[in-house]
Image: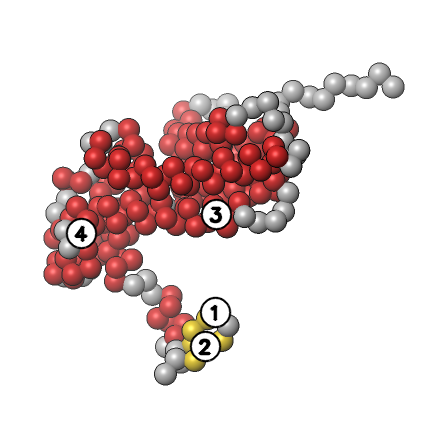
């Protein structure tokens, strides 16, 4: 029987090895995300996904039931993961400024870590059928709402200016990160005057401009 210490479960000598190995469902999700991002929904079969995951097609059906449900699970998993992280950061008790800096960095890192799923989400948002988009929007709205809440909280505390809409600031943060995700490699390769290859530098600059503006503080006459 498993022993528990705090929130961690200890299963004996094989515990560390088994925890390091992704579950069958997680492995299928990752394999499906890769193929869906590369070929689109109609461009790959359940057999293709099973082969990519190195499992049987029956195993894929066992976990997800159909290709449509698997596709939705891929999208849902990355949205939910991002939402959990954003919620944790927003509810932290540090200053709104510190939380904004961490949220900016964490959001961009999530996009980069879940690259295939992010490409799928963006495709669904801007190119796919309305039914798929409508199914995703409540979850995406919830995630976006965490960032809006963070900015509004800073305004209520008197840390941030109150003469700007919190949702507009949140959109600037998200939009800047999405643009980096989509275009940084291309801009770095083809625009020799720009170096957009460091996500940490980019997220720090975005947070800095959002928090402090671009104009230099006027010099004092004293």
Question: Can residue 204 be spotted in the picture?
Answer: no
Gap between marks 2 and 1 measured at Cα: 7 Å
Crowding near the residue tagged with mark 2, few <14, some 14–19, many ≥20 C-alpha atoms within 10 Å: few
- Mark 3, residue position: 87
Q: Find residue 203 and report its horizontal and vertical position in percent.
A: 53, 36
Please name the residue shown 21% across and 50% down the image: 70
Characterize the local packing of mark 3: few (<14), some (14-19) or many (20 or more) Cα atoms within 10 angstroms.
Answer: some
Q: Give SS at disc 2.
A: strand
Density class for disc 4 (Cα within 10 Å; few <14, some 14-19, many ≥20) is many
* Distance (Cα) linking label 4 and label 1: 34 Å
Is tag 3's residue or tag 4's residue first in the polypeptide sequence? 4
Residue ranking furthest to the right: 222
In space, the residues marked 1 and 3 are separated at their CA atoms by 20 Å
On screen, residue 203 versus residue 116, left or right, reads right
Mark 3 or 4: the one toward you? 3
Tell me the distance, in whole angstroms, between the alpha carbons under discs 3 and 2: 27 Å
The residue closer to the viewer here, 182 or 96, is 96
Residue 157 image position (x, y, % from top left): 64, 37
Q: Residue at x 26, y 35 (%)?
A: 134
Q: Earlier in the sequence, mark 4 or mark 1?
A: 1
Q: Nearer the viewer, residue 52 or 194?
A: 52
In the picture, the quarter occupied by the C terminus is: top right
Q: Which mark is residue 7?
A: 1
Q: Which residue is mark 2?
A: 4
Mark linked to residue 49 = 4
């Amino acid at each position: 029987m498993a022993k528990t210490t705090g929130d961690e479960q200890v299963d004996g000598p094989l515990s560390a090895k088994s925890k390091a190995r992704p579950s069958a469902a997680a492995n299928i999700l990752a394999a499906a995300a890769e193929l869906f991002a590369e070929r689109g929904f109609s461009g790959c079969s359940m057999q293709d996904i099973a082969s990519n995951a190195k499992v049987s097609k029956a195993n894929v059906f066992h976990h997800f039931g159909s290709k449509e449900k698997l596709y939705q699970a891929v999208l849902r998993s990355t949205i939910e993961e991002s939402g959990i992280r954003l919620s944790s950061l927003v509810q932290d008790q540090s200053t709104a400024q510190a939380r904004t800096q961490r949220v900016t960095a964490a959001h961009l890192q999530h996009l980069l870590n879940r690259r295939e799923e992010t490409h799928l989400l963006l495709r669904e948002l801007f190119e796919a059928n309305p039914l798929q988009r409508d199914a995703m929007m409540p979850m995406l709205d919830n995630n976006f709402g965490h960032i809006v809440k963070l900015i509004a909280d800073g305004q209520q505390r008197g840390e941030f200016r109150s003469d700007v809409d919190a949702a507009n600031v949140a959109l600037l943060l998200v939009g800047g990160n999405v643009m980096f995700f989509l275009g940084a490699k291309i801009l770095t390769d083809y625009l020799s005057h720009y170096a957009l290859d460091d996500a940490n530098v980019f997220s720090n600059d975005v947070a800095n401009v959002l928090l402090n503006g671009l104009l230099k503080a006027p010099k004092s006459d004293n």
